[in-house]
Amino acid sequence: MISRTLLQQPTDATAAQPAQPTQPADDPAFQPTSSKAPDSKEQDWPEPEPEPEPEPEPVPVPPPPPVRPAPDLEDVEDLMFVDDDIEADEP
């Protein structure tokens, strides 16, 4: 764990350099920003927020197909038969 005293002490590189502004005030390229623009007739209005896109209409879901009734047990028994005359093919 790093102690707070180490974090608060300046390093040698930062202690050797005095604090300087990034651009001096007498630099002609340096222009401080101001809240008023004397020559500007247009006001800086905030950008309008884009309108939210309308939600797509829900696609209608077709109703499920009707459930077929269960077949009668007698019909199923007629389909289930075993032919004893047929012999299984042996490999």
Image (tube, rainbow, N blue to C red):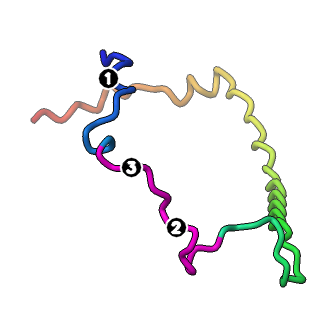
Judged from the image, the secondary structure of the residue bearing numbered disc 2 is: loop
Name the residue at the left extreme. 91
Kind of residue sitting beneath label 1: Leu
Front disc: 1 or 3: 3
Does the magenta segment cover residue 18? yes
Kind of residue sitting beneath label 3: Pro
Taking the spot 59% from the left edge, 26% from the top edge, the residue there is 76
Kind of residue sitting beneath label 2: Pro
Tell me which corner region of the image, top left, top right, bottom left or bottom right, holds residue 46: bottom right
x and y, in percent, of residue 34 in the image: 76, 66
Question: Which residue in the protein does label 2 denote?
Answer: 24
Tell me which corner region of the image, top left, top right, bottom left or bottom right, holds residue 38: bottom right
Give the Cα distance between marks 3 and 2: 14 Å
Circles 3 and 2 in contact, beta carbons < 8 Å: no
**Few, some or many residues within 10 Å of mark 2 (<14, 14–19, 20+):** few
Tell me which corner region of the image, top left, top right, bottom left or bottom right, holds residue 68: top right
Circles 1 and 2 in contact, beta carbons < 8 Å: no
Taking the spot 25% from the left edge, 39% from the top edge, the residue there is 12
x and y, in percent, of residue 18 in the image: 38, 49
Judged from the image, the secondary structure of the residue bearing numbered disc 1 is: helix
Q: Could you tell whether 6 is left or right of 34 in the image?
A: left
Q: Which mark is residue 18?
A: 3
Q: Nearer the viewer, residue 63 or 22?
A: 22
Q: Could you tell whether 3 is left or right of 55 in the image?
A: left
Q: Bounds of the magenta span? A: 16-31
**Disc nearer the start of the sequence (1/2):** 1
Above or below for 47 versus 16: below
Taking the spot 22% from the left edge, 31% from the top edge, the residue there is 88
**Few, some or many residues within 10 Å of mark 1 (<14, 14–19, 20+):** few
**Few, some or many residues within 10 Å of mark 3 (<14, 14–19, 20+):** few
Question: Which residue in the protein does label 1 denote?
Answer: 6
Quadrant location, the C terminus: top left
